[in-house]
Image (cartoon, coloured by chain):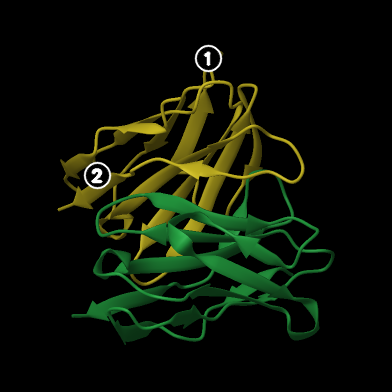
Amino acid sequence: AQSVTQPDIHITVSEGASLELRCNYSYGATPYLFWYVQSPGQGLQLLLKYFSGDTLVQGIKGFEAEFKRSQSSFNLRKPSVHWSDAAEYFCAVPGGSHGNLIFGKGTKLSVKP
Amino acid sequence: KAGVTQTPRYLIKTRGQQVTLSCSPISGHRSVSWYQQTPGQGLQFLFEYFSETQRNKGNFPGRFSGRQFSNSRSEMNVSTLELGDSALYLCASSLDRTPDTQYFGPGTRLTVL
């Protein structure tokens, strides 16, 4: 069965520092992978997605993610974090049936000034 | 294009009541999915509608139901509310193709007292 693991519940980084959020997945076939971000009290905004092709995917707000099949990972990175990046980040894979995404538990990012 | 809209944004109900939440998808999107988000369980898939038909359902009791109209707008209904139904209810729309991307609304925050 498909599943997503985000090992880090909460991460704190200093503004201007680099960021890497981890995501490991279990998926039977070639995975489709997503990263979403959620600000407090808001819905989910799509940051980026991987369907096929280049394993390094660029997204919005300066984020990128790299698909590594051998490690079943799709880690999210940003070279320099801004205070406005403080939010909760979710990795997701399709659930194997229509309209169903399976989400990780999320990683909450705090940014120190 | 306008994004996914959900109404109302906030709702307070008491146990035993019922509630109806509304979702308008992005223009041209025909698939609408609903999710429940709670601190303990995270994001959980409720159901998905396409062309006015429920195609997929998550593991929720029959008190949770939904429907979709010919203009793709969707409603979900929760009857006989329980305290544990307090959650953020998120709606997502997609074009319905493989692979596909879901775009989320801001959510409806339901509080059951």
Residue B109 position (above or below residue B67):
below
Relative to B77, is A110 on the left or the right?
Answer: left
Callout 1: chain: B
Observer-nearest of A86 and B53? A86
Question: Alpha-carbon neighbours of circle 1 within 10 Å: few (<14), some, or many (≥20)?
Answer: some
User: Looking at the image, how many numbered discs can be counted on the residues?
Assistant: 2
Name the residue that disc number 2 marks: B16
The quarter of the picture where residue A81 lies is bottom left
Callout 2: chain: B
Residue A76 shows in the view: yes
Q: Are marks 1 and 2 on the same chain?
A: yes
Relative to A1, is A44 on the left or the right?
Answer: left
Chain letter for the green colouring in the rendering:
A
Give residue A78's position: percent from left, percent from top.
Answer: 47, 73
Identify the amino acid type marked 1. Answer: Asn
Chain B's colour is yellow
CA–CA distance in space, label 1 to label 2: 31 Å
Choose mark 1 or mark 2, whichever is in front. Answer: 1
Identify the amino acid type marked 2. Answer: Gly
Q: Residue furthest top?
A: B70
Identify which residue is drawn at 30% across, 51% down.
A42
Q: Which of the image's four quarters has the N terminus of chain A?
A: bottom right
Label 2 residue SS: loop
The quarter of the picture where residue A96 lies is bottom right
Name the residue that disc number 1 marks: B71
Relative to B79, is A97 on the left or the right?
Answer: right
The quarter of the picture where residue B96 lies is top right
Nearer-N-terminus badge (1/2):
2
Give residue B6's position: percent from left, percent from top.
Answer: 34, 33
